[in-house]
Amino acid sequence: MTEDDQLPFNGSSDDQDSQLAPDAVMATDPGATEPKATEDIDHGDEQGIPATPGLDGVGDEQNAKLPAAQQVDDVQAPAGFEGVAAEPAEALAAAKSAESVTTSEERASGALYFLTNRMNLNGVLSSRLVAPRESFQKYYADLLALTPGWVPLLRQAPTSRQIDAVTSERGAGAPIIVEFSPEVAGKSKSDASVVYVPAVALSAAVAIHLPSERDLREHRARGYSNVHAHDDLLRVTPELFESEAADPANFKPPNEPADIDWRRIDRIRGAVSAAVTAASTGEQLALVAAMIGASKVPAAFGRPPWLGWAELDDHLRPDSRSRPDSALPDHLVFRAVYDVLGERDVAEAWSPNDVLDAVEARVRQAALTTDATDAMVRNLSRVRSIVNVEVDFEPFRPSTQALVSAKALLLLLLRQELDQLLAWSDDETGADDATRGVAAVLAGRLRGLSRESTALRSVELDDLTAAWAVRVARGGSTKLGKAQFVANGRGTSLRIDGVEVATRGALLPDLMSKYKKVAEAKKEATRVRVSRAMGWPVEHRIQLPQGALIDSRDTLLSIYTPEEVVLTVAVEEIGFVRRLESLAGGERLKAAGALAARR
């Protein structure tokens, strides 16, 4: 098999068919009603206690108008309900008609309050976003159940019935109030007792209020790997939880909520975050910057032309992305993989072969050219044989036939966890910058943002993508923001809307530009010098005189002749250039030094 016919890789596939463990390991303290988590908090799927159809303002007719993913079923009454005489569904119904009397001090402050419970707060903290009930994976009944597709913000402290409603489910924990400034209300009526917003970024929060020191202690006692530090927001404010007002007012959200797939939003945010985290060099950061729309990024850093923000942002339904070029199997395979992974939950079930089956099925539906079909089949077959341990894998080698999307998929199928994927050195994988970046995008797409460890996330980028999600929910711009790539002799940085989200080392020299500037008469010698420094093959040619005798013993070749023997060395240019363009990281720096050397 020739080099171009292979998709070579080297590594172990012991974990290829294993199902990952749940994201959080839960244990219950004796006498406590809340689970203790030692890892991270799930957030993003639709499980738990949905709202009750037929409540005032949230009736069956309105429910029927919602997309299937947002329609709500009957509330399941949680066992062990305490503190309110009514069942949980009745408590929620009563809560929607309770309104506290606004004091002059509260009215003057203009504060907006999001009332929930401590377990739901964990979901908010993990995603850095307050979004509708449909955005939660693990959900405990609160006021969001009364307002499908919307987030209700109270203009005054909650009433006792509202507090009872958000703590009615066993295990929900203490009531929590997230306070926001009035600016998040936008153009909502200033005299409305409840403001309905599609979503609000946690970065806009003024404070997170708890009823008592005990509740604060309980909250701090449980650490989660996917929650950023937030102690600066925590407040013990018992007076906010002691309102005695009970003026009736119905929860009447707007009839048509935004048609948003919140799970898809979380997966897009995860893909962006993973791509930035994976960029360990200035070159890789340049690739990510170009991917999310930054201008003035040097074109020499190998970003696949089909990988841009419009390819990653698939939140609109139906899919508004342009169709891939049928002559570009790389684009088509990436699109299929990206879509398939967005529909999978690695915490629930995982099978590399099922993923490959789904990808192949989608690709075969496209009208590919014959050459593109052959390239796709050859690449995906190679991936499957390596995943199934039918063929050993070796580090990737430069090849015009190996697809970036297929190589990235192989990396992901062997190591689904982002931290494990990034710990796999480029020396072992042979991955170039584009393959590494695309593999990270796929890993982020598979897991999403809110379940990923904050050790692999940036709070600045999390808040920027949360702000993007809010804009999308409000029907605003779908662009992530104004991306800017800055490079100088000291280093590189990526900024979005003026916020610096990543800094890396300075860019290495443009190797191809340096090589092209070499005088034509010196290019052969340059290729030989660089190839020897890099350990690449160098061809040695010996011109034998007429009648010369040759004696070959092991590693010694003797030539017997009275004439002069001529030895020349050469390196074929096409292969040299291909190797030079594929270099990354330390290898690129080594080649730059060899190019600059003088003899």
Image (cartoon, rainbow, N blue to C red):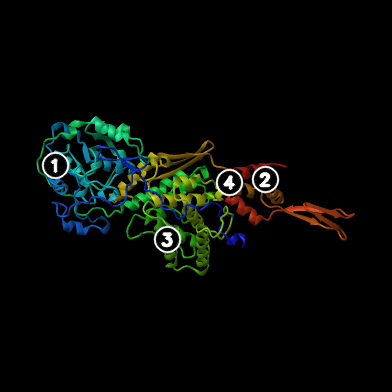
* Mark 4 vs mark 1, CA separation in Å: 70 Å
Residue indicated by mark 3: 354
* Mark 2 vs mark 4, CA separation in Å: 18 Å
Q: Which residue is at 62% across, 62% downward?
A: 2
| Mark with earlier residue (4, 3) | 3
Question: As drawn, is 380 to the left or to the right of 460?
Answer: right
Question: As drawn, is 567 to the left or to the right of 85?
Answer: right
Kind of residue sitting beneath label 4: Asp
Element type at mark 1: loop
* Mark 2 vs mark 3, CA separation in Å: 44 Å
- Label 1 packing within 10 angstroms: few (<14), some (14-19), many (20+): some
| Mark with earlier residue (4, 1) | 1
Q: Nearer the viewer, residue 1 or 219?
A: 219
Quarter holding the C terminus is top right
* Residue depth check, mark 2 versus mark 4: number of the one nearer the observer: 2
Residue indicated by mark 2: 533
Residue 168: where, in percent of width, then height? 19, 43
Residue indicated by mark 1: 84
| Mark with earlier residue (2, 3) | 3
Element type at mark 4: loop
Q: Which residue is at 18% across, 35% downward?
A: 241
Residue 75 appears in the figure: yes
Quarter holding the N terminus is bottom right
Q: Quadrant of residue 539?
A: bottom right
Kind of residue sitting beneath label 2: Ala
